[in-house]
Image (cartoon, rainbow, N blue to C red):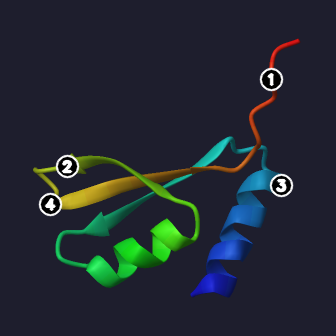
């Protein structure tokens, strides 16, 4: 799982994606912990889909001068 996730993030960076977004089904705590350890943060709960939205920046923020 970790290797596949790293490949997906590298692909996103190569396409200049600023962030990666994914969804975790309700009750899938194992996946939720996995993504948190990989740097994803929970954004919100989608009640109509019964899943959590997670996001991770792929490009470091550049401070303003």
N-terminal of the pair, mark 4 or mark 3, is 3
Where residue 4 sits in the image (x, y, percent)? 64, 82
Q: Measure the alpha-carbon separation of dots 2 and 1.
A: 32 Å
Q: In which quarter of the image is the N terminus?
A: bottom right
Distance of label 4 from label 2 (alpha carbons): 6 Å
Q: Is residue 37 above or below residue 14?
A: below
Q: Where is residue 10 in the image (x, y as percent from the top left)?
A: 77, 64
Tell me the element at label 4.
loop
Vertically, is 6 above or below 47? below
Where does label 2 land, which residue?
46
Closer to the chain start, of discs 4 and 1, is 4
Q: Which of marks 2 and 1 is nearer the N terminus?
A: 2
Q: How far apart are marks 4 and 3 (CA)?
A: 31 Å
Mark number, residue 63: 1
Q: For mark 3, what is the residue?
A: 14
Tags 4 and 1 touching, CB below 8 Å: no
For marks 2 and 1, give the one nearer the viewer: 1
Spatial separation of the CA atoms under disc 2 and disc 3: 29 Å
Q: Nearer the viewer, mark 2 or mark 3?
A: 2
**Residue wearing tag 4:** 50
What residue is rendered at 78% in x and 44% in y?
A: 16
Taking the view exactly as shown, the residue that stands out farthest to the left is 48
From this view, report whether residue 56 is shown above or below residue 23: above
């Amino acid at each position: 799982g970790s290797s596949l996730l790293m490949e997906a993030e590298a692909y996103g960076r190569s396409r200049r994606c600023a962030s990666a977004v994914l969804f975790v089904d309700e009750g899938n705590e194992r996946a939720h912990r996995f993504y948190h350890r990989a740097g994803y943060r929970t954004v919100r709960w989608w009640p109509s889909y019964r899943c959590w939205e997670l996001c991770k920046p792929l490009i470091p923020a550049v401070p303003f001068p």
